[in-house]
Amino acid sequence: MILEVEPVGVVRAARKEPIDDRWGGSEATIELDPRFDADALAGIEEFSHAEILFHFHLADPGKIVAGARHPRNRSEWPAVGIFAQRGKGRPNRLGTTVCRILGREGRSLRVTELDAIDGTPVLDIKPVMQEFLPRTPVSQPAWSHELMRDYWVPGEEA
C-alpha cells in the first residue's frame, strides 16, 4: 500500500540544523499551507498545548533503521529496536512533539519547544486533551532518562 500525505504547513524557526539537544525555550511558527483558511486554526489558542506531527525531511533515507541500534550510536546504551526509540532514522521519518501554544495570527501558530528545524514539513496539528494523555503512570528505562538529560535545556536561540 502506498500512502500519500501532503504537508499542512511548514515550520519557521531560528534553528536550521538538526541537533540532538538544547531545545528548551526554542520558539517556532507553523505557517499553514495556502490551501487552508485562517479559520482552520480557530479555537486552537484555547488549548495550552498542541501535538505536532512532522517529517524529518533532512534525515538521510540511506540511514533508515529497520531493526535495532544503539540510540545516538552510543554503545554504552543498549541496542534497542527503532520503535523503542525516537530517532530520526525511522522507516517513515516521522516525528511528533507536544509543544506549548504561544498564540496564533491568521494562518500562523506560534509554539515553544517544538523540536523541528526551519523548513520542516508539518503533517498535522492536534490540540492536546488531557483525556488522550496516558491514564496510567509512564515508565521508561534508565538509559532514556540519560539520553534526554539535555534535550530540553535552553539553547542559544531560546
Image (cartoon, rainbow, N blue to C red):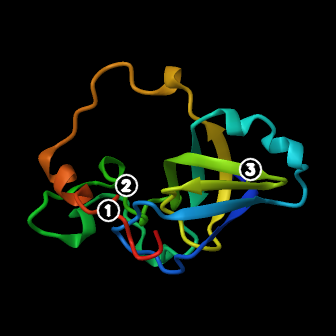
Mark 1 residue crowding within 10 angstroms, few (<14) / some (14–19) / many (20+): some
Residue nearest the viewer, comparing 21 with 67: 21
Q: What percent of the width, then of the height, locates residue 84?
A: 30, 48
The residue pinned by badge 3 equals 104
Given the image, on which type of amino acid does mark 1 rest?
Val
Label count reads 3
The local secondary structure at tag 3 comes to: strand
In front: label 2 or label 3: 3
Q: Residue at x 52, y 76 (%)?
A: 15
Q: Are marks 1 and 3 in contact (CB under 8 Å)?
A: no
The residue pinned by badge 1 equals 153
Q: CA distance from mark 2 to mark 3?
A: 28 Å
Given the image, on which type of amino acid does mark 3 rest?
Arg
Residue 92 visible in the shown view: yes
The residue pinned by badge 2 equals 86
Q: In the picture provided, is 96 more to the left or to the right than 122? A: left
In the rendered image, which quarter is residue 46 located in? Answer: top right
Mark 3 residue crowding within 10 angstroms, few (<14) / some (14–19) / many (20+): some
Q: CA distance from mark 2 to mark 1?
A: 18 Å
Q: Residue at x 66, y 45 (%)?
A: 125
Q: Residue at x 48, y 80 (%)?
A: 17
In the rendered image, which quarter is residue 68 located in? Answer: bottom left
